[in-house]
Every structure is written in C-alpha cells, then in structure tokens.
Image: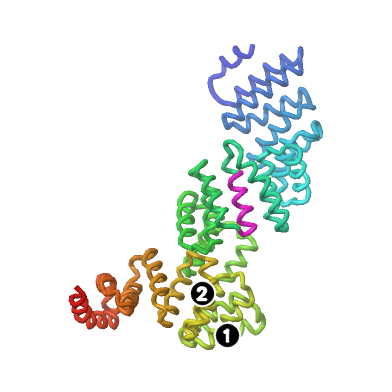
Amino acid sequence: MLLRCVKFVKSGTALILLCLLTAFAAAAQDDPAAAAVELFNAGQDAHEKGDLKKAVELYEAALKQIPEFPEAEFQMGTALAVLGRHADAESAFRRALELREAWTLPMTALGSLLLQRGSYAEAEALLTKAVESDEQNVGAFTALAELRIRTNSPEPVLQALLEKIRALTAKASPTASIWLSRAALELAVNDPASARTSVGRALEVEPKSFAGALQRGEIALAMNDAKAAIADGERLVKSEPNSDPAHYLMARALAADGRIDEAIEHLGLIKIPTPEIENFRERIRTASADNVAELEKKLESDPTNGPLLGRLCNVLRTSNPQRALGYCRLAYETDRTNINYVIGFAAALVQAKQFDNAVSLLVQIVAAAPENYTAHANLAVALFQLKRYPEAKREYYWIVARQPDTAVAYFFLGIIHDQLKEYPDAMANYQAFLKIADPELSKVEIEKVKLRLPILQKQLKNRR
C-alpha cells in the first residue's frame, strides 16, 4: 500500500509526507506500536537528510500513536533546536526525561539548551548529573566547561574539570570539540601556552573549524600577540562576514595593535552588541582621545579609570615625559595584570631617561610576554643607552628577526658591533641600514653612517 501511494506522487515533499502518514494510519489500526516505529524510522531518515520540518512532523505522528515514546521526543527536540524553536525543543527534552529519567542524551541536550538561554543553575545541575552518570559524555563535558567559564567558577573548580577533560583527550580519537573545551579551560586558568597547543590539536582534527580559529585568536590576544590575532580575525571575517564574534575578535586585536579607528569600524559591524562589547567600545574611544585637558577633566570624576590613565600616559609620553610617568605609574598600579599599562609605564621610564628602572621592569615584561614587540623595542633602547651592548645586541637581533624592514634596528646594531670592535658585523649592519633607510626620515643617521664607513673600511683592512 505504501509503495503504491508513493508511486502515484509526482512531486512535492508535502504530498509524499501525506501519503506516508496515510499509509501508516492504515497500519496503525492493526498495530499502533509498529506504526509508531515505522513513523519514527522515517523521521530518522528525513532527519539524516536534513529535512528537519518533515522529520518533526513524522516524530509528532509517531507520538500520536505512542505518547510514551522517549526516543521520538528526544529526536524531535534535537530537530526543533536546530530549527530555532527552542521552547518546543525544551518541552520535548523535558518530556523525554520524564519518560526515562536517567537518560543522559536528553539530559545533556536540555542542559546545553538552558546554558545558551542563560538558565545557568538548572543547566549546571543537569550537566553535572550527566557527566557523573557517563564519564565519556563529551557533549556534557563540553557544555559544562562553557558554563564554568561563563559563570566565572573558582580556579579549583576549573582545574578539577580540566583534569577530567584532559583524561578524555588522552583516549583514542578525541573530538575537536573536546580539545577546544580543554583549550578554553587552560586559558581560563591562565595557561595560554597549553591552550595554544590544545587548539592546534583541535585544528588537526578539523582544519576548517571556525570555533578553533576563533579560539586561537583569543589565545593570541591573551599572549599579547596582536599580529597573530589579527591574522586569525581576518580569516574569520572573510569566511563569515556577518559573524559578531569574528568582528569582536578583530576589533580587540586591532585595538591591541594601536589601530583604534579600524577597531571601531569592526565594532560598528556587530549586529547584536552585548554590554561587554559596548563597554569595550567606550574604552577604546577614550583610548583614542588626544585632548589632554578633556581627558584630565574626565579623570576628576573617575580617578582610577585605567583606560583614561593609560591614554594620558601615551599622549604625554613624548611631549612631557615626567608628567606622563605619573599617569603611567597610576595606570600600572590600577591594574597590574594589564600588560599594556605595564608596558606604558616602562616606555615612560625610557622617555624620562630612567633607564635602569626601565630595564628592571622590561626584563620582567619580556619574561611574561616573550613575543611582545613593544617591550623588546623599549628594552633594546634602554640597554643601548646604558651601554650594555651585548644585551642590547640580542634585543635588536630579536627585532630584525621579526621585522626585517626595521631600518633603525640595523643602525643601532651597526653602532653596537662597532663599539664591541666586531667590525665585519658592524659593516654588514650599516650597509643593511643604508639599503632600506628612508632618505628623508633617516637623513641624520644616514649621514653619520656615511661618515663612519671610510674609517671602518680602513680598520677592516688593518685587521687582515
């Protein structure tokens, strides 16, 4: 009967579905349970093919035959959730749990759904029960990790969950999602190096994972590597131009790189700005202001405002180093965990010619953030001014290794090798400087090098 019915339908999934239901209704007169199973299986087939609306209708039809059918409730809930019918999905998951209380699949699905809707207390209870009942439940562990991070759980709680997830990743064929959960927890407990490794493993499993690239960008920001975060942000925005998380990552990365106007542009492309995003927008607007009197007036009503203090530190650093130093110190004392404030303070010490103090602080910064270009550049200057040439040489070589077109670094390397009587290296660096230096911007330095080269050539000959 079913085959004949389908044969006469020429087109249209609705007609085919009607035909199926008619056939199953006829069968149900003899055996409702068998008809329900047939409807459920047909729903599964539609579900696998991506026809979610048809799947839901078939699951509903199965439930009309057997109202106490937990599998149908659960599968209907998963289809409804993907369709965006979250309230209906929640009802289906709850009904599945009523019918089979200890079943961890609807328990996990309901907990994950409640997590996304902000019902954290009930989500936590469900997800905790799910992982206690099934220690291999990757979905529950993944959702629980997200919940713990969102609710700012204490570090011991995060560490305990991290250890369980690490055990899961040690088993055969771990999924990309569990690697990303591990990375998120490692970042939350301030272990960005391990988090970067875990994200790398996730991307080995799923090279095109949007979530993986997004998290890699977050880790780069945490490690103060704005350039790497920008690279990930650019790829994400290109692949999903309407993604709010991608634009937010890009905005923060650009701001960290000092490109405030571009950061504001990306914030303007965010369709649903959260309070966190609005707060960030206001902070970088403050960070881009240049009027000292206006900034100081704002500071009167909010004397511990870190972004205001940091901006005054930057604005005044060149024109009034001693005054800037005060604001830099206050910014640093307001939030010692903000590396930008610490670097600002160190840079102000360099501008104020307090080189010994600057070196002491910059050595600590470089140890904590070994890839931070600004810290290395300021440390190089301070060491050079203190005539600590071997140490300065190491810093300038670090700079040219990362940015080979930095002409001034070759100029100082030439001087350093000259002072250390390492004349062949001095000559090589002076020549590298002359090759790429801007004739106008580096006019004074170019003249100095040209005056020095003839004497240096004689010294080289005399040493042969």
Query: What's the coloring here?
Result: rainbow
| Left or right side of 193 for 399 | left
Percent coordinates x, y for residue 339 in the rendering: 56, 70
Classified by dominant secondary structure, the portion drawn in magenta counts as helix
Label 2 Cα neighbours within 10 Å, binned few <14 / some 14-19 / many ≥20: many
Percent coordinates x, y for residue 446 in the rendering: 26, 79
Q: Nearer the viewer, residue 266 or 143?
A: 143
The magenta-colored residue range is 178-190
Badge 1 or badge 2: first in the primary sequence: 1
Q: Nearer the viewer, residue 4 or 429?
A: 429
| Left or right side of 231 for 183 | right
Label 1 Cα neighbours within 10 Å, binned few <14 / some 14-19 / many ≥20: some
Q: Quadrant of the N terminus?
A: top right
Percent coordinates x, y for residue 248 in the rendering: 55, 59
Mark 1 vs mark 2, CA separation in Å: 18 Å
Numbered badge on residue 326:
1
Query: 339 above or below 93?
Result: below
The amino acid beneath tag 2 is: Leu
Q: Residue at x 50, y 78 (%)?
A: 359
Q: Is residue 416 visible?
A: yes
Tag 2 residue: 362
Query: 36 above or below 94?
Result: above
